[in-house]
Image (cartoon, rainbow, N blue to C red):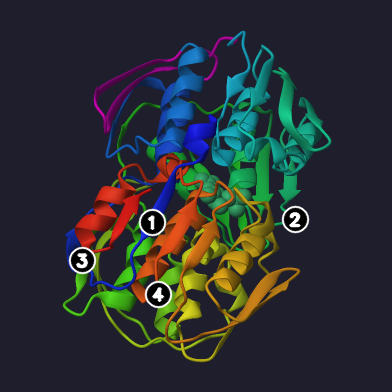
Amino acid sequence: MTGSSRGARYRVEPGGEVAGELTVPGDKSISHRSLMFGGIAEGETEISGFLAGEDCLATLRALQALGVRIERPEPQRVRVSGLGMEGLTAAGVPLDMGNAGTAMRLFMGLLAPQAFDSTLIGDESLMRRPMERVATPLRLMGANIRTQDGRPPVQIQGSPQMRAIDYALPVASAQVKSAVLLAGLRAFGRTRVTEPAPSRDHTERMLTAFGVEVLREGATVAIEGGQRLIGTSVAVPADFSSAAFFLVAGCFAAERGLVLRNVGVNPTRTGLLEMLRLMGADIRVHPVRHDVRPGGEPIADIEVRKSRLKGIRVPDALVPLAIDEFPVFFIAAAVAEGETLVRGALELRVKESDRLAAMAQGLTALGVENQLLDDGLWLRGSTRLGGGTIESHGDHRIAMAFAVAGLVAGSPIEIRDVTNVATSFPGFLQIARSAGLQIESA
Ligand code: S3P
């Protein structure tokens, strides 16, 4: 990243009202998977509603480097000409995953059983993130993977003779689950993955849509090795994690209501809805349609109105179902009446930044009393926040969360290092402004 892009900032003026209707960009998790699964499927895959953000573009470029033909007739429409399970070829250069943890971890599962070697690298943030959680189960399957002190670069020596395992995930992680299942597709025997708590199930759904038989036995997902994927069409819903910023904005400042269109409401993603409702939010979910084909994702319009929020103790079971929404949830809690407590959220320390520490630091800068815990955060809400300068630590969701805080701040908020907003939410500034946030790049 260049010095000047690192210097990109937002300046948010205090107050304002949000209103109207908006559609946020496509789901990041589903966009990554549609490209990868399309690449190893037989035949064409047509993707609509694709998220043209930097993370998914890193996946797209990596697949091209592995020999997959990909066309983009429009920014959000992608046509992938699948090469089948054995058709990928060596990239010959390190594959750069940029800021995308999902891309790196899922590619580990996809590339470990290939007949060629691969090296995976990423940006400064990704090069600090833990990869042994994926390398460990893949090695049990026979993979030959090297990390550097547990972190990228990830060096994969292709091992086409992998075997199925029965693996209990130590943490609820859709990325680890997905990597093991992807490797399981090429392994001998039936691979089983058991989760300590439910994590997002887009892989299981989408593999089904591509014709794979996915078996579910309670907390265990199982697939038989040697199955083929058949190309299909994938309609990517708007990303609930991007809609989340406007759900909280609506709780703060939608006197006349704010409607978010065509949002993916897969129940393994919508923990924030439950959390905001427990806080007293006025949110209505109007189902639009459920893609009735096998593996379809549920979609809804979500309507939110301004309401007074009260602090809560977040139920542990909701943590994995809201894992990416904690930055903006803490902003909601910062102006809720009373105290809020989150525990059991250790995973937040190994996201694009240490999100517990980054949020504690930012909340302190805005005058919010808080206490950083090993695995969570305690804070006391106040009706109005102060202004000040926020370090995003190059984390897209920290940057966008503090942009929403402007609606309830008493003076301007400046947010530093916002370039990575483009990894998940291209066009955030324009959409936020159209909704009513008084935000500009500084
Ligand atoms: C993702 C899974 C989650 C999430 C990430 C996307 C996915 O990570 O935080 O943004 O697409 O599978 P973990 O698997 O590490 O919980």
Give the residue number, with chain letter if any, for mark 4: 409
State yes or no: residue 64 in magenta: no
How far apart, in angstroms, are the residues tagged by discs 2 and 3?
A: 38 Å
Give the residue number, with chain letter if any, for mark 2: 170
Most foreground residue, 83 or 125: 125
Task: Answer with mark 3 or mark 1, whichever residue precedes in sequence.
Answer: 1
Give the residue number, with chain letter if any, for mark 3: 259
Camera-side mark, 3 or 1? 1
Residue type at mark 2: give it.
Pro
Could you say whether the residue bearing mark 1 is in a helix, strand or loop? strand
> Is there any visible trace of residue 80 in the rendered image?
yes
How far apart, in angstroms, are the residues tagged by discs 1 and 4?
A: 12 Å
Query: Which mark, residue 173?
Result: none
Task: Answer with mark 1 or mark 4, whichever residue precedes in sequence.
Answer: 1
Q: Mark 3 touching mark 1, by CB under 8 A?
A: no
Most foreground residue, 239 or 367: 367
Camera-side mark, 1 or 2? 1
How far apart, in angstroms, are the residues tagged by discs 1 and 2?
A: 41 Å
Give the residue number, with chain letter if any, for mark 1: 11
Quadrant assignment, res 29:
top left
Q: Position of residue 253 (x, y in %)?
A: 28, 76
Task: Answer with mark 3 or mark 4, whichever residue precedes in sequence.
Answer: 3
